[in-house]
Image (cartoon, rainbow, N blue to C red):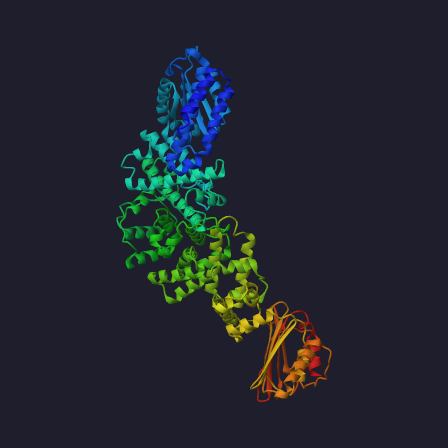
Amino acid sequence: MEKNTPNLKSKIEELLHENAPDFKIANVLKEDLKSYNQTLEKTFAQSGGKDFLVKHTRKIDQIIGWVYKVAVREMFGEYQPPTNAVPIALVALGSYGREQLCVHSDIDLMIVYRDIPGYRHQELIEKILYLLWDTGLKLGHRVHDTDELLDVSRTDITIKTALIESRFIIGSRFVWTETQNRLRLIRHDDPEMFIRAKIEELRRLHQRFGLTMEPNLKEGVGGFRDANLVYWIGKLLYDVPRIHDLPATILDEEDYREFRIALEFLFRVRSALHLVAGKKEDRLRLENIPDVAQLLGFGMSQRGHMRLAKRVMGSLKKIRLYSKIWLEALVGDRVADLYDALLRPDEALDHFGDVLRYLNHHADRFYTAHPALLRSIIHSSRPERPSPKLYAQIRRIFEQPHAYATLTTLSSINLLGYTIPPLKKVIDLPQFDGYHTYTVDIHSLQALRYLEEPKNDPLLDELYHGLQAEHRCLLKIVTLLHDAGKGRKRDHHQVGASLFRVFAEKLGLTQEHITMGEQLILYHTLMSTTAQREDLYSEKTILRFASRFKTPTLLAMIYLLTYADMKGVGGDTYNHFSARLIRTLYRASLEVLEDKKALDETARRLKRIESLRRSKAFNTLPLPIRKKILAIPSNAFFIRHSTARIIAIGKAAYETEKLNYSLANQHYLTLEIIRRDNIRLGYLLAKLARLNIVSMEITKLFDDLKYFKIDFSEALPEDDIHLVDTIIHDAFSGEKTIDFVKPAIQRKEITVDCDHSREYATLRLRTRDQKGLLAYVIHRFDAHRIDIASTKIHTVKGRVNDLFLIEKNGNFCHNIENLITELTE
């Protein structure tokens, strides 16, 4: 950065010799800055975090130094007095004063002076400022007489802060000495007020800028303000130039090393962020991560982006932790009233087992760990991995009313992954999904917090406190681990369930509870997706959901888990609208739990679907076919058929334009028909009435297609097979008619249930077996355009017991009397 100095110096000297106007000199400095800015990325690549900031700071010092010299030369000409005789000093403030100036940050400059007659200091100061502005520097400035500095510091806490970190740039050393004398007075002027104000200021900033997926590197939790506050208070109380120079009773050397590594990394991240944004930017937004990652050498892959974001989050946590510990050591109990009641140990906790016992003992209420407690835990001894004895204490965490307080304490000192091993891989893991506000571990802790807190919903509170103690404990473990499977190649629901099982076994949970926990984690997103994306007035929807949670306890637990998960996302994900949808799904599911038969049927369907999804043959199908097959509404279709048959029928249907059929006639005749337009099934059955029907399957597929499978009791003579082709085409075309034989049916032999379910009615026929019976019944259904969803044909000892499941499309229940009359008279 210094290589251009001789050239710059000669240009300015030449202009001064020519008495060139100020704007020409300013233009030279401006061009030099422009050239310098074009080398910033190259310089950044060759520098460390703080080193780059120091180099940049010194370049600005150089420009300001030249401006000062030019202004003094122009003011005094050949009679220029010694530098110390001109009663003006230029002083850097803020990040510029700390030599931490980022490339697009404001340059905070203070000009201090002594009002000595004959020096026209005001004119000189104006000339300096005008020249600086003309160079294009982004300047923030203040001008003060040294005598007024103490009074000025009392007007605003921000001004006092800036003055504390003043750094001399150029000018009179005498004026700077006087300034330093005033700064000593400022440091000792009501230090308690300053400390209280700065801590309260930081607390407000943390409330505004939490530890989210888009952290504020300057003012957010764990940002530079945390580190700066340690520096400011250390400077105030001990007059040390660096945090590292604080007394050993405050600063542990190993802790400082971790702190410094984290801070150095964040310096680099912030500099890179300024460079890629081309402006002052302190928030690491998701859209900036790819460019920042590339500039920092993490690469352009998604994995590189994840590594960057994860390291940023870990660094922020470390800075927050050690800043908190050192601040407490610096200020003691001076500002204790600014915080909630803090949990502080009466004696040293030497072993991690003692730590957990102590935390569990106090988790009957919500607590915040005192920094002294955090320091004690950090330095407590612990085995390489949790022992069986330690797992007993870990289980007790979840048995307490406020597990969140304990787990948050462990998270703040980077021991959450040690204590809860399934979480190791998701600590600081970012979620670039545009949905989650937090990293996986923070989201999981937030979810647990909302689970334990009083809820603004009487039903949720009632369900939570209505759970047995062991179920509440189980639900807390599940809530914490529900996303533990993220960051892997496999589906995170399945990985999470596996991780939960191993952990739960170490905790000593029963097999019954482990199975419940696995089910909750496997389907922890099912309630929210069902409630927000599917028809909650569809019986199929309710049954599909409820079949996963077949007991009131399990249903209550998934409801509570869904609530906590959505609240833990952040923002307004859980709002009045989503809350109403989830509550509706819960109540509807609770109603259908009594229908064990329907639930079991739906569960069997879902089991077949899982088998399909694991099938290689199924996964080789085009995605549109797979989606259509899985959307087939009939449970019976999935229960009746093997995976291979379902795939075959689905493929055949997808390729069907209007009609597709096949027949088999080895031991008995079997017809399989797929059609789009209406087919006169009654006509077809009547034409084949000489054969007894053993079973008949009717299934709605997709795209207005229906599947028919009819099994007859015997085979046709080979010479008659061609007639079946003709009958099917005639039934499809509708050109030919037939006289149906009307069977003898009594009214009492027909039972109709229009309240069978929301979507289906049933008609049961119990009568003697007769030729053409089924053909006539189906014929009347065809006449009324009654849509049969499925059938069960059963004949024993000359008596039929047929059941028809019929869609409620308005053509059945409104025509019952007419239909029964036609069938019986």
Splitting the image into 4 quarters, where does residue 46 fall? top left
Give 742 or 131, whichever is nearer the viewer.
131
- Whether residue 427 appears in this view of the structure is yes
Give 395 or 226, whichever is nearer the viewer.
226
The residue sitting at 46% across, 28% down in the picture is 33
Residue 175 vs 509, above or below: the answer is above
Q: Is residue 95 left or right of residue 780?
A: left
Where is residue 422 drawn, in percent x and y?
Answer: 37, 57
Q: Quadrant of the C terminus?
A: bottom right
Splitting the image into 4 quarters, where does residue 776 fall? bottom right
- Whether residue 218 appears in this view of the structure is no
Q: Is residue 422 left or right of residue 555?
A: left
Residue 77 vs 794, above or below: the answer is above
Where is residue 443 drawn, in percent x and y?
Answer: 44, 51
Give 149 or 713, whichever is nearer the viewer.
713
Q: Quadrant of the N terminus?
A: top left
Where is residue 562 drawn, in percent x and y?
Answer: 48, 57
Q: Is residue 666 left or right of residue 67?
A: right
Residue 370 vs 61, above or below: the answer is below
Where is residue 722 drawn, in percent x and y?
Answer: 65, 84
Residue 449 vs 228, above or below: the answer is below
